[in-house]
Image: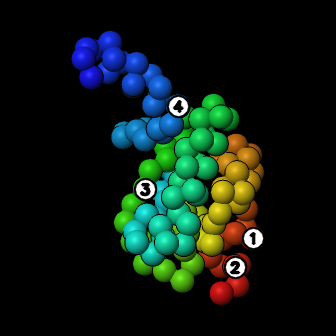
Amino acid sequence: MKSLAELQAIKNRMKDKVVLRDGMEGARVVVGMATCGIAAGARPVLNAFVEGVNKEGLEGKVTVTQTGCIGICQYEPVVEVFEPGKEKVTYVKMNPDKAKEVIEKHLKGGQVVSEYTIGTVAV
């Protein structure tokens, strides 16, 4: 980098790829990115949530972030959705297509996609 203008250009290019905010109200999507999650395919799931939230214009209402071990390795990739005043929803055995469905039905539509939650997925 040679100037502040170049740094600003990089920031502008990356803005649509990052939906990581602190102190926001609204839904928070947390993707387990420990070794087991990454090995099971969590990185494409995280990317699908980040891109989908941006595409749907939810970046002011939904925070997407990552965490380490969630503790249920056999169900990886694991995604937890936290919403103010509601119980946490744990989605398991996720993939990018399931992430798109969760964005559409849960984050936009308010309906939990129960067939992907920990209580309903077969091991």
Q: Nearer the viewer, residue 79 or 81?
A: 79
* Left/right of residue 115 with respect to residue 40 in the rendered view: right
Give the distance between the C-alpha atoms of the residues marked 4 and 1, in whole angstroms: 30 Å
Whole-percent x, y for residue 79 in the image: 54, 63
Residue annotated with mark 3: 66
Q: Nearer the viewer, residue 87 or 115?
A: 115
Residue annotated with mark 4: 16
Going from the N terminus, do you reach mark 3 or mark 1 first?
3
Going from the N terminus, do you reach mark 2 or mark 3 first?
3
Residue density around tag 4, few if under 14, some if 14–19, many if 20 or more, within 10 Å = some
Circles 2 and 4 in contact, beta carbons < 8 Å: no
Whole-percent x, y for residue 106 in the image: 69, 52
**Residue at position x 47%, y 67% in the image:** 38
Going from the N terminus, do you reach mark 4 or mark 1 first?
4
Residue density around tag 1, few if under 14, some if 14–19, many if 20 or more, within 10 Å = few
Which numbered dot is residue 121? Answer: 2
In front: mark 3 or mark 1?
Answer: 3
* Left/right of residue 53 with respect to residue 65 in the rendered view: right
Amino acid type at image mark 1? Glu
Amino acid type at image mark 2? Val
Give the distance between the C-alpha atoms of the residues marked 2 and 3, in whole angstroms: 22 Å
Amino acid type at image mark 3? Gln
In front: mark 4 or mark 1?
Answer: 4
